[in-house]
Image (cartoon, grey):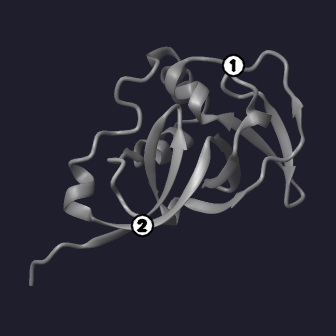
Amino acid sequence: MGGNRISTVLLFRAAGRRCALPVERVVETMRPLPYEAIAGGPDFVPGVALVRGAPTPVLDLGGLLDGVRREVAAAGRWVTVRAGARSVALGVGGVLGVAQLAAAGEQGLPPLFQGSAGAGVRALGRLDGELLTILESARVVPEDTAP
């Protein structure tokens, strides 16, 4: 039968990049919530928030990507993703919307972690391999990608 399979993605900004994450990985998007700082964690995990009654780690995705510590409360939005039986809130610059990408073309897009700060990505892999696997499905997309 052939034909291009279509993939539905959530478009968002992180560390100046336009990114896409398959929507089946996304639980919801929301405004940033108050969170409690955690001592001794990596710079890209500034704290834990109470999201829908459950303690949820907050990850500064831009900080993970470029290795610069930011205040995650300054993130434009949070994107929560399911990692096994729990959720993780990703602080992102903003959510742009939902788009359809041809799966074949999506595979040709650069991975989210291409050119990123390696130490942070390696640390995430040691701390949470399941979340790393989810984020490895994200791609950097061209600016002219709808919406």
Image quadrant of residue 123?
top right
Q: Position of residue 1 (x, y in %)?
A: 9, 84
Q: Position of residue 61 (x, y in %)?
A: 59, 35
* Earlier-in-chain disc, 1 versus 2: 1
- As helix, strand or loop, the secondary structure at mark 1 comes to loop
- Checking the image for residue 99, the label placed there is 2
Report the Cα–Cα distance between label 1 and label 2: 31 Å
In the picture, the quarter occupied by the C terminus is bottom left
- Checking the image for residue 43, the label placed there is 1
**In front of the other: 143 or 122:** 143
Q: Position of residue 121 (x, y in %)?
A: 49, 25
Q: Residues within 10 Å of mark 1 (few under 14, many from 20)?
A: some
Task: Tell me the amino acid under the disc marked 2.
Answer: Ala
- As helix, strand or loop, the secondary structure at mark 2 comes to strand
- Checking the image for residue 75, the label placed there is none
Residue at 46% x, 18% y: name it: 117
**In front of the other: 39 or 97:** 97
Task: Tell me the amino acid under the disc marked 1.
Answer: Asp
Q: Residues within 10 Å of mark 2 (few under 14, many from 20)?
A: some
In the image, residue 47 above or below residue 56: above
**In front of the other: 136 or 112:** 112
